[in-house]
Image (cartoon, rainbow, N blue to C red):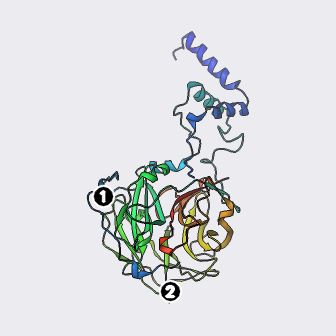
Amino acid sequence: MSRLPTSAMASCLFVLWVVSCSSSPDDANDSFTSAGPDNERPRSDMGSTKSPADRDGGLVEPDGSAGKGGIPSTGGSTPPDGSASRSLDAGWMDRGDRGASTDDRDASIDAAAADVPVHGGSDAGSLDERSCGLPTTFKWTGGGPLAQPKNGSVAMKDFTQVIHNGQHIVYFTTFQSSWGSAMMMFKDWPDAAGAPQIKTSYGVAPTLFYFTPKKVWVLAYQWGPHKFSYRTSSEPSDPKAWSGEQSLYDTALPAGGTGPIDQTVICDSSRCYLYYAGDNGHIYKSSMAIGSFPGEFPAAQDSGIVGTAQNLFEGVQVYKVKGSDKYLMIVEAQGAARYFRAWTATSLEGPWTLLSNDFAVKKNVTLTTNWTNDISHGDLVRTNPDETFTVDPCNLQLVFQGRDPNVNTDYGRLPYRLGLLTLQR
């Protein structure tokens, strides 16, 4: 065995002395969290009657020039990029040493040696390291509208969004002289205002996700030749790349009235589920084996959630709660203004248990500018874009449609805009 030089042995002894005699766990923790803004990512807070007769009017296929308006197209069969989902971490502490000084990195090593959490308090751990669980009461904050309708549209609504290749991809409903649809892409929420909005020739109230088992993107919507329809693609950033229209669902339940409206799709490990509303106080569900999806769902049944046309209206969305065995359902209700109620279940088969009558409502939302009373049809920001629709309760954000409450006009012309809420914990 060779011997260490005296100088090297002295260095080793010094390191051992530092580790064994380092400051207390609390001191180590404080020394890391004092690293300052270079170690922290700023949070990106920013603060019915639909007639199928209108569905074909006012829709324009995107042309080549529209595609040049700042919308990147990666092309090819591109699966979701896991790294892209890290843009959802707005407001969390970054565990890397990006921008940190040597002293800051040394502090983090001291904290690790003391076997204590390096940020978030002496025992708490960081939000990205622990499971928060769903709260039973909710408080949200937000800013003004993130985007205004373009291309002659007077309203933009019914948003579905994913993060793919570092970009938010948003598909939504529009209204000009009749109902239409569009999509846009942007890097982060503040960029939404300047993002080009490309008209699409699909139906309205879309749902966008990546179906992992068959490595294909799915865009589901209503008001085509079927009750609900879908298209597939290898690249969701290209609005011209979608396949021909296929039937997602074509059974008239409920009969009469609005009929099936505002679908959403979610899958577990063995089955895919279709949930939708009827504007009649009921939520309906159907399912198929995951190996048969995408395809046409069989006739639906009542989900067992029953209310009134006021408190169980439309805009149903279903999610898997990260770090738990729970699923979360939110449904839009209407009263003095639009708002969301919420239910949970441990299986997509149900039964569903009421979680909150006030999931997102004007009285528990604080906005930097009072631009809307409606907290209406939207989508929780997901941890990834796949068929599980997983959301992180440690970092819940809700994309929604809001409008100026002082404008009263025909439903289609109500000036709905894109908004974003962040849950305060």
In this rendering, the answer to whether 234 lies above or below 1 is below
Q: What kind of element bears circle 2?
A: loop
In three-dimensional space, the C-alpha distance between marks 2 and 1, rounded to whole angstroms, equals 38 Å
Q: Which residue is mark 1?
A: 66
Residue farthest to the left, as pictured? 64
Q: Position of residue 379 (x, y in %)?
A: 53, 63
Q: Amino acid at mark 2?
A: Leu
- Which label is found at residue 1? none
User: Is residue 136 left or right of 199 when viewed as pictured?
Assistant: right
Q: Is residue 189 visible?
A: yes
Residue 18 lies in quadrant = top right
Residue at 56% over, 64% down: 404
User: Is residue 230 left or right of 91 when viewed as pictured?
Assistant: left
Q: Amino acid at mark 1?
A: Ala
Residue 40 lies in quadrant = top right
Residue at 51% over, 70% down: 414
Q: Position of residue 313 (x, y in %)?
A: 58, 77
Q: Position of residue 214 (x, y in %)?
A: 38, 65
Q: Position of residue 143 (x, y in %)?
A: 58, 53
The crowding category of the residue bearing disc 2, from other C-alpha atoms within 10 Å (few below 14, some 14 to 19, many at least 20), is some
Q: What kind of element bears circle 1?
A: helix
Residue at 56% over, 42% down: 42
User: Is residue 303 left or right of 158 when viewed as pictured?
Assistant: right
The crowding category of the residue bearing disc 1, from other C-alpha atoms within 10 Å (few below 14, some 14 to 19, many at least 20), is some
Nearer to the camera, 189 or 136: 189
Q: Mark 2 or mark 1, which has the lower sequence index? A: 1
In this rendering, the answer to whether 177 lies above or below 215 is below
